[in-house]
Image (cartoon, grey):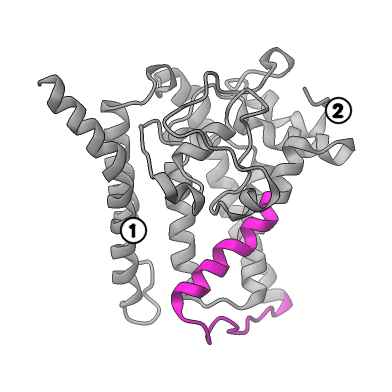
């Protein structure tokens, strides 16, 4: 393939892949919202497998940094154990939430019913993201026992020195439970409709995947709306000056509270923690799981 053709393909991937993924998600959401009552989400496994398949193929063929690529060791010795722990954690969290709802008779109102779908979805993204922003920021910047404990709980996600699609799953189960609580419980009690929660969760899921994507995706001004590949990659920088962007989905809280970091067309020189020798390696699964139960000083 000629150099000009390669450059054209790379440019199409950089500026066209994310809009394509977002349009696919929006189209899928439209299809699901028009399903008969009680069947919302019936095609979700096909949607997820399709999106993951396309993203994984592009990531393998066109990685932004070869040193950030998924390897046999990184997947089987790190990602897979965390994926399995995350699946168990998710299943247990959902079960306990269901038991609590039935046992305590927790009923939701429909406070979002008076809002059109789009404004309700925006609120359903922004409200929990504000809570996560502050917990996430405390995990990185907080002092004292609580701040140090939050860092030890969140640290697993920052030990890897790569970012790629499946690396998104590398997280301590306690961290995963806290994220689950923050992203769902407030919206449940605020009474957002099932349709609003479904669409909001689709956006959260897509942003979670693209934020760890090892592909040169560029979205320009849209970085000031949603946290995606360009912004979250800096969050994983080993340089504390760059490791900002604490929001999970929307950029507004980082912009408002002065932690927005964006350098167009640049990437961090080094990913991971500042002093890796102070912690277990990301392959030492059991030692990483024990971190929140030990006295750990922030680097």
Residue 185 vertical placement versus 161 (above, below): below
Q: Earlier in the sequence, mark 1 or mark 2?
A: 1
User: Which quadrant is the C terminus positioned in?
Assistant: top right
Which residue corresponds to the image point at 45% horizontal and 57% vertical from the top-left? 203
Is disc 2 placed on a helix, strand or loop?
Answer: loop
- Residue 131 in magenta? yes
Which residue corresponds to the image point at 58% horizontal and 38% vertical from the top-left? 261
Dot 2: within a 10 Å radius of its alpha carbon, few (fewer than 14), some, or many (20 or more) residues?
A: few
Residue 242 vertical placement versus 225 (above, below): above
Q: Position of residue 123 (x, y in %)?
A: 57, 69
Residue at numbered disc 1: 25
Residue at numbered disc 2: 295
Mark 1 vs mark 2, foreground winner is: 1
- In this image, 83 relative to 72: left or right? right
Task: Identify the residue at the far bottom of this view.
Answer: 114
Q: CA distance from mark 1 to mark 2?
A: 43 Å
- Residue 143 in magenta? no
- In this image, 12 relative to 278: left or right? left
Residue 171 vertical placement versus 285 (above, below): below
Is disc 1 placed on a helix, strand or loop?
Answer: helix
Residue 145 vertical placement versus 250 (above, below): above
Q: Is residue 188 visible?
A: yes
Q: Which residues are magenta?
A: 104-133
Which residue corresponds to the image point at 57% horizontal and 76% vertical from the top-left? 192
Task: Give whichever of 157, 67 is nearer the camera.
Answer: 67
Residue 260, quarter of picture: top right
Q: Position of residue 297 (x, y in %)?
A: 83, 25
Dot 1: within a 10 Å radius of its alpha carbon, few (fewer than 14), some, or many (20 or more) residues?
A: some
Which residue corresponds to the image point at 63% horizontal and 48% vertical from the top-left? 254
Task: Identify the residue at the far right of this view.
Answer: 144
């Amino acid at each position: 393939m000629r150099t000009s053709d390669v450059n054209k393909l790379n440019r199409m991937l950089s500026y066209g892949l994310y809009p394509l993924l977002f349009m696919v998600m929006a189209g899928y959401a439209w299809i699901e919202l028009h399903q008969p009552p009680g069947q919302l989400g019936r095609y979700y496994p096909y949607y997820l497998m399709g999106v993951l398949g396309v993203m994984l193929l592009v990531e393998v063929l066109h990685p932004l940094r070869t040193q950030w690529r998924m390897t046999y060791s990184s997947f089987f010795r790190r990602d897979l154990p965390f994926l399995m722990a995350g699946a168990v954690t998710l299943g247990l969290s959902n079960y306990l939430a269901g038991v609590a709802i039935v046992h305590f008779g927790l009923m939701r109102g429909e406070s979002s019913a008076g809002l059109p779908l789009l404004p309700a979805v925006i609120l359903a993204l922004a409200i929990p993201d504000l809570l996560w922003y502050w917990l996430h920021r405390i995990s990185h910047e907080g002092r004292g026992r609580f701040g140090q404990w939050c860092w030890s709980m969140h640290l697993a996600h920052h030990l890897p020195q790569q970012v790629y699609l499946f690396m998104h799953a590398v997280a301590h189960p306690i961290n995963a439970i806290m994220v689950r609580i923050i992203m769902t419980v407030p919206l449940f009690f605020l009474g957002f409709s099932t349709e609003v929660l479904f669409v909001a969760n689709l956006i959260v899921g897509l942003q979670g995947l693209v934020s760890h994507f090892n592909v040169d995706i560029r979205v320009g001004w849209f970085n000031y709306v949603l946290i995606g590949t360009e912004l979250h990659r800096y969050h994983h920088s080993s340089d504390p000056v760059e490791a900002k962007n604490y929001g999970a989905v929307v950029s507004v809280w980082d912009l408002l509270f002065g932690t927005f970091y964006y350098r167009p067309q640049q990437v961090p020189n080094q990913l991971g923690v500042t002093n890796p020798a102070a912690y277990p390696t990301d392959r030492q699964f059991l030692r990483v799981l024990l971190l929140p139960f030990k006295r750990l000083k922030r680097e």
